[in-house]
Amino acid sequence: HSELHLQDFHLKQCLFGDELMTEICCMPGGMMRISGVPYSVEVVKKRFRELTSSHIDTLLWSMKRSSREIRNIRGYLLTSLFQAPTTK
């Protein structure tokens, strides 16, 4: 189980370290693509501000249970986190 906790730690570092979350929050205005769909940066920032620890935990849980190989972790996380506040 310590291996899973270590994976969680690394994923959380990727999400909350100086990487994806910071990158999104510091983006200037304009447009960006998520899963090939264009969104305004302000819409993306708003969605990311709506994220809770429950969203993150659910994402980590689903990633651990998945048997699919994630080839583009940044794209996967970006899409999953963007969609998380709109799903139940």
Image (cartoon, grey):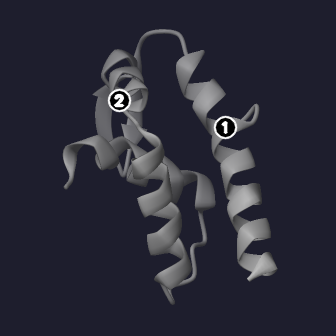
Q: Earlier in the sequence, mark 2 or mark 1?
A: 1
Q: Nearer the viewer, residue 35 or 13?
A: 13
Q: Which residue is mark 1?
A: 16
Residue type (three-letter) at the residue carrying disc 1? Phe
The residue lying at 37 percent from left, 42 percent from top is 82
Q: Nearer the viewer, residue 4 or 11?
A: 4
Disc 2/disc 1 C-alpha distance (Å) = 14 Å
| Residue 46 rendering spot, x and y as whole percentages | 34, 21
Q: Is residue 61 above or below residue 13?
A: below
Q: Nearer the viewer, residue 49 or 5?
A: 5
Q: How many labels, in total?
A: 2
The residue lying at 76 percent from left, 31 percent from top is 18
Q: Nearer the viewer, residue 9 or 21?
A: 9
Q: Which residue is mark 2?
A: 50
Left-right relation of 48 to 22: left
**Residue sticking out furthest to the top:** 29
Q: Secondary structure at mark 1?
A: helix
The residue lying at 51 percent from left, 53 percent from top is 77
Residue type (three-letter) at the residue carrying disc 2? Glu
Q: Quadrant of residue 8?
A: bottom right
Left-right relation of 12 to 78: right
| Residue 86 rendering spot, x and y as whole percentages | 21, 44
The residue lying at 79 percent from left, 79 percent from top is 3
Q: Residues within 10 Å of mark 2 (few under 14, many from 20)?
A: few
